[in-house]
């Protein structure tokens, strides 16, 4: 009995032990399964990556960034071949050469800091970036050095770097890239996704030390190059606009730069866009002129802020300003469209009082009674105040919105600013707000908004979205995408458009815009001179289009804070628009009016040295040139020994060439007369009478001459003189 109890007790104890062991093994099995599940499914992807990283080495294949072209296929931004230098610290330490010596010699080749390079080589890592955008010549030197010294773990990889063939041409439109070839500004930034392409890679099998396994096969994923971008910009028109703006800034002592936009009114395509000051696209971070360079890097936040506020700022899109009288063309369009006035309706420019404020004509000598058309020609402020009152506040500001002044234009560029009206501050429009707005004061818009509105006047009344990108192309030159003209809305009728075009043609022909006149081309446009928030600081502008009956270009010029002889848009901005229009239409092969004798022709002075006087004078007469003979021997068979101007000089027909029958020991000089206030005929006659020639710029009366009155100048010289209309010019 006792034995049975003992046996039963022992059996129970064994069962308990077995149960404990079973529970223990069950827990262990569960833990093992859990661990396997965790490793396989939770951490599996991470371990796969670690194993892949340990067993393979990836080399990135950089895609070629797409090229940026102008509308005619001229390269504006291209990629050139460079190298990227990387190292594998774990492999480089296996080289025979001491690490310090490797760092020293590589630093010499790269012209970089040795200590920083050594620190990277001593890291416990598989990959370190050493240098980007290294020249191919330097890359070749490093490759040769590696082979000569049996260096492992240094890699010279192919890469590309952005290069801009034209320097600062269209800088704000094209933009630039960063050290990683990423777009940072302009089209380089806005079209980044299509330009950058898709990187590829080469996968190489390596052992645990990171060394490539012999006879292993690389796997390769090809890079997909970026698409090419074709802009609406025309390189030649861009150059014309930039050259004209540079000259205007210099001639008129403009302190705060300016902007020019040239647009095709029928498509909305931007043919040229200029903002000054600008910068070299190949060195975008250089210190702007006039600022301290001692501690300049171009990368500090202070440096970037300064660049953004000066040379990087695109005034054509970002700067808001009061448009002044250029806005009167918009108001005239409203009035004619709403039929509140006709062009032959009599009005006057006598002062008008609005809510206690007297508004006078800009011209202190009032024009008095005049038709509305004459009011447009003379740019009379009271006339437009009265017209706005006929329209009423609701209708007036509805048209302001219809012409696009409340909204951004939607051009595919960064940095476009919002306009500024009283309503933006939560204020209701008062009659005085509308009154001063009727002549372009006390609200602010951007240049791109104004030229877009003028394009609507020019094209039959349609407000278009401005276009800067024309199309995208693949690496084979196939067009993959086009950016078509987008009509926002019709603002005015075709009839109103034609009426306003004719009126603005008169502004240039006989009104305040005479300085934009171009012989042979009918230019239409409107002047603008506006005050700013700062006393004594003005904005001079002119917006015009041509040919007036069938416009193909619209041009806007804005000059900020001119400090020269005049700050009037009609004096200093109108001639710039006229010059750009003339050169652009000539470039576009638009014929001049056939029935107008528009300009004196250029001719080339022939080489007359060693010719007899009889032969020389006949050649000059055939070229429609005049002559003066210097020397006592004037026989027909006497030879010409010297001439001035020299052969192959381009002059206007009827210019004077001085023929010498002797070798002058000293040049023959004459005293420069004063041409100021003389008209073109008087100035030319005055110079010709003493054997001087003239190079005429502009129309009207002479306001400046190249050589000061009283100075001596060589007989036969070509004297440049500037002419402007100064009377009744706003």
Image: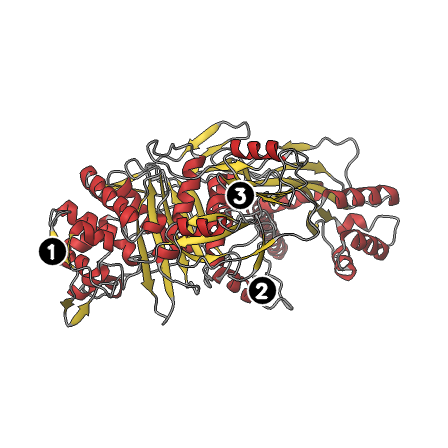
In this rendering, is residue 222 above or below 41?
A: above
Question: On the image, which quarter does residue 701 sit in?
Answer: bottom left
Quarter of the view holding residue 142: top right
* Residue shown at the point (30%, 35%) measured from the top left: 550
From the viewer's perspective, tell me whether residue 694 is left or right of residue 408.
right
| Badge 2 or badge 1: first in the primary sequence | 2
- Seen from the viewer's position, the closer of residues 639 and 193 is 639
Quadrant into which the C terminus falls: bottom left
Q: Which mark is residue 300?
A: 2
Image location of residue 411, percent across then percent down: 38, 46
Depth order, front residue of 327/685: 685
Query: In the shown orientation, is residue 700 left or right of residue 276?
Result: left
Residue 412 seen in the current view: no
The answer for how far apart the CA atoms under marks 2 and 1 are is 55 Å
The residue closer to the viewer here, 261 or 144, is: 261
Q: Mark on residue 10?
A: none
**In percent of the image, x 20 and y 54: which residue is there?**
375
Q: Position of residue 695 (x, y in %)?
A: 49, 48
Q: Secondary structure beneath disc 2?
A: loop
Give the number of the disc on residue 390. 1
Which numbered disc, 2 or 1, marks the residue closer to the eye? 1
Q: Is residue 337 above or below residue 356?
A: above
Position of residue 224 relative to residue 16, above or below, is: above
Please tell me which of labels 3 and 1 falls first in the chain. 1
Q: Is residue 552 visible?
A: yes
Residue underneath mark 3: 656
Residue 598 position in % (x across, y down): 38, 38
Marks 3, 1: nearer the viewer: 3
For the residue carrying disc 1, how many other residues have a C-alpha within 10 Å: few (<14), some (14-19), or many (20+)?
some
Counting residues from the start of the chain, the first of labels 2 and 3 encountered is: 2
Q: Quadrant of residue 233?
A: top left
């Amino acid at each position: 009995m006792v034995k049975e109890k003992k046996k039963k007790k022992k059996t129970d104890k064994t069962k308990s032990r077995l149960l404990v062991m079973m529970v223990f093994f069950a827990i262990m099995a569960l833990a093992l399964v859990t661990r396997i599940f965790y490793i396989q499914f939770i951490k599996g992807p991470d371990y796969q990556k670690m194993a892949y990283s340990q067993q393979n080495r990836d080399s990135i294949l950089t895609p070629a960034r797409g090229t940026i072209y102008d509308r005619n296929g001229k390269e504006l931004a291209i990629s050139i071949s460079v190298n990227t230098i990387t190292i594998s610290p774990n492999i480089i330490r296996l080289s025979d050469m001491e690490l310090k010596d490797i760092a020293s010699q590589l630093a010499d080749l790269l012209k970089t800091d040795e200590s920083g390079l050594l620190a990277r080589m001593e890291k416990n890592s598989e990959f370190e970036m050493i240098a980007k955008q290294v020249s191919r010549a330097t890359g070749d030197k490093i490759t040769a050095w590696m082979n000569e010294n049996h260096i492992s773990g240094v890699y010279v990889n192919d890469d590309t770097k952005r290069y801009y063939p034209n320097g600062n041409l269209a800088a704000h439109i094209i933009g630039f890239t960063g050290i990683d070839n990423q777009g940072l500004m302009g089209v380089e930034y806005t079209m980044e996704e299509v330009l950058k392409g898709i990187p590829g890679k080469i996968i190489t099998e390596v052992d645990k030390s990171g060394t490539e396994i012999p006879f292993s096969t690389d796997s390769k994923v090809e890079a997909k190059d970026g698409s090419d971008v074709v802009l609406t910009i025309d390189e030649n028109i861009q150059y014309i606009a930039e050259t004209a703006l540079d000259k205007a800034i210099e001639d008129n002592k403009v302190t705060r730069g300016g902007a020019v936009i040239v647009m095709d009114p029928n498509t909305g395509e931007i043919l040229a866009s200029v903002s000054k000051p600008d910068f070299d696209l190949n060195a975008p971070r250089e210190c702007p002129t006039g600022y301290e360079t001692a501690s300049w890097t171009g990368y500090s936040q202070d440096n970037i802020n300064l660049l953004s506020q000066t040379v990087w700022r695109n005034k054509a899109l970002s700067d808001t300003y009061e448009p002044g009288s250029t806005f009167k063309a918009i108001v005239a369009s409203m009035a004619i469209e709403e039929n509140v006035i006709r062009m032959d309706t009599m009005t006057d420019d006598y002062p008008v009082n609005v809510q206690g404020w007297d508004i006078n004509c800009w011209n202190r000598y009032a024009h008095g009674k005049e038709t509305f058309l004459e009011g447009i020609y003379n740019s009379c402020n009271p006339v437009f105040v009265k017209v706005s009152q006929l329209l009423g506040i609701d209708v007036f500001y509805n048209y302001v919105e219809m012409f696009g002044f409340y909204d951004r234009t939607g051009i595919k560029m960064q940095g476009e600013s919002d306009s500024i009206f009283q309503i933006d501050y939560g204020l209701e429009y008062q009659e005085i707000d509308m009154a001063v707005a009727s002549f372009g004061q006390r609200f602010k818009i951007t240049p791109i908004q104004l030229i877009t509105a003028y394009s609507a006047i020019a094209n039959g009344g349609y407000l278009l979205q401005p276009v800067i990108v024309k199309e995208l192309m693949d690496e084979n030159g196939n067009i993959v995408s086009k950016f078509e003209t987008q009509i926002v809305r019709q603002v005015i009728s075709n009839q109103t458009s034609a009426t306003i075009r004719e009126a603005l043609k008169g502004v240039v022909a006989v009104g305040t815009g005479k300085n934009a006149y171009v012989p042979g081309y009918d230019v239409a446009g409107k002047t603008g001179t506006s005050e700013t928030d700062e006393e004594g600081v003005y904005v001079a502008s002119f917006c015009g289009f041509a040919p007036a009956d069938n416009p193909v270009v619209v041009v806007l010029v804005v000059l900020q804070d001119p400090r020269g002889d005049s700050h009037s848009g009609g004096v200093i901005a109108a001639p710039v628009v006229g010059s750009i229009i003339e050169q652009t239409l000539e470039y576009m092969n638009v014929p001049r009016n056939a029935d107008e004798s528009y300009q004196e022709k250029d001719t080339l002075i022939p080489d007359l040295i060693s010719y007899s006087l009889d032969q020389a004078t006949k050649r000059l007469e055939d070229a429609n040139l005049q002559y003066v003979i210097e020397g006592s021997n004037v026989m027909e068979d006497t030879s010409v020994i010297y001439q001035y101007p020299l052969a192959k000089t381009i002059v206007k027909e009827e210019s004077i060439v001085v023929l010498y029958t002797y070798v002058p020991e000293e040049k023959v000089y004459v005293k420069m007369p004063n041409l100021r206030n003389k008209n073109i005929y008087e100035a030319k006659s005055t110079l010709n009478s003493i054997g001087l020639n003239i190079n005429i710029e502009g129309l009207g009366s002479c306001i400046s001459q190249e050589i000061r009155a009283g100075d001596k100048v060589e007989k036969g010289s070509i004297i440049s003189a500037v002419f402007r209309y100064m009377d009744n010019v706003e």
